[in-house]
């Protein structure tokens, strides 16, 4: 029997728990221009929201208030977003008040900047899909 693999077309969404939903929404709107797609931020301990850009990327965030139900929330090591105009990324992040740490990392076929959102989720901002891997 021949092994058949699924073909990934693009990342649909990233789902994560956050400490402060309002602060997280503001961060993704301010830094990346993401737009509110679904707002359930007024639902108390079950609050959640989806922000993103149509046909590009979506992030679904849940308020991590119920530590009894999820004592140790699953973590995301990091997720990568391909950005345009990489040459101005450090300047644009600084203007938005985002700590750029050590600046960008030069990989063999691409550059990346690693930043953190207000919850400590690491985001790899890169200039090429897959770091330029073929």
Image (cartoon, rainbow, N blue to C red):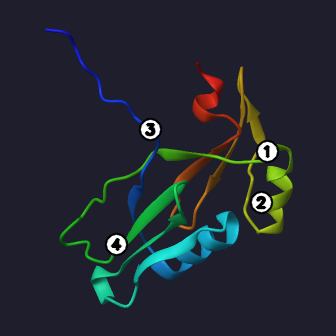
Residue shown at 30%/29% (left/top)? 6
Distance of label 3 from label 4 (alpha carbons): 30 Å
Residue shown at 44%/38% (left/top)? 9
Check if mark 1's residue and mark 2's residue have beta carbons within 8 Å: no
Image coordinates of residue 47 in percent, x first then y, are 34, 81
Q: Earlier in the sequence, mark 3 or mark 4?
A: 3
Q: Earlier in the sequence, mark 1 or mark 3?
A: 3
| Of labels 1 and 2, the one closer to you | 1
Classed neighbour count for the residue bearing mark 3: other residues with Cα under 10 Å, few (<14), some (14–19), many (≥20)? few
Distance of label 2 from label 3 (alpha carbons): 28 Å
| Of labels 1 and 4, the one closer to you | 1
Distance of label 1 from label 4 (alpha carbons): 33 Å
Classed neighbour count for the residue bearing mark 1: other residues with Cα under 10 Å, few (<14), some (14–19), many (≥20)? some
Distance of label 4 from label 2 (alpha carbons): 26 Å
Classed neighbour count for the residue bearing mark 2: other residues with Cα under 10 Å, few (<14), some (14–19), many (≥20)? some
Closer to the camera, 18 or 4?
A: 4
Closer to the camera, 13 or 41?
A: 13
SS for tag 2?
A: helix
Distance of label 1 from label 2 (alpha carbons): 11 Å
Q: Earlier in the sequence, mark 1 or mark 2?
A: 1
The residue under label 4 is: 64
The residue under label 1 is: 86
Horizontal relation, residue 119 to residue 108: left or right: left
Residue at the top extreme, as displayed? 1
The residue under label 2 is: 93
Check if mark 1's residue and mark 3's residue have beta carbons within 8 Å: no
């Amino acid at each position: 029997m021949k092994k058949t693999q699924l073909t990934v077309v693009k990342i649909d969404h990233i789902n994560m728990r956050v400490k402060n939903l309002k602060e997280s929404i503001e961060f993704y709107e301010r830094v990346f221009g993401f737009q509110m797609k679904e707002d359930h931020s007024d639902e108390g301990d079950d609050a959640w929201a989806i922000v993103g850009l149509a046909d590009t990327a979506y992030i679904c965030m849940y308020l991590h208030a119920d530590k009894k139900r999820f004592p140790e929330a699953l973590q995301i090591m990091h997720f990568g977003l391909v950005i345009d105009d990489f040459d101005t990324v450090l300047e644009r992040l600084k203007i938005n008040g985002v700590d750029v740490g050590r600046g960008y990392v030069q990989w063999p076929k691409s550059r990346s900047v690693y930043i953190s959102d207000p919850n400590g989720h690491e985001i790899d901002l890169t200039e090429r899909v897959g770091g330029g891997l073929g």
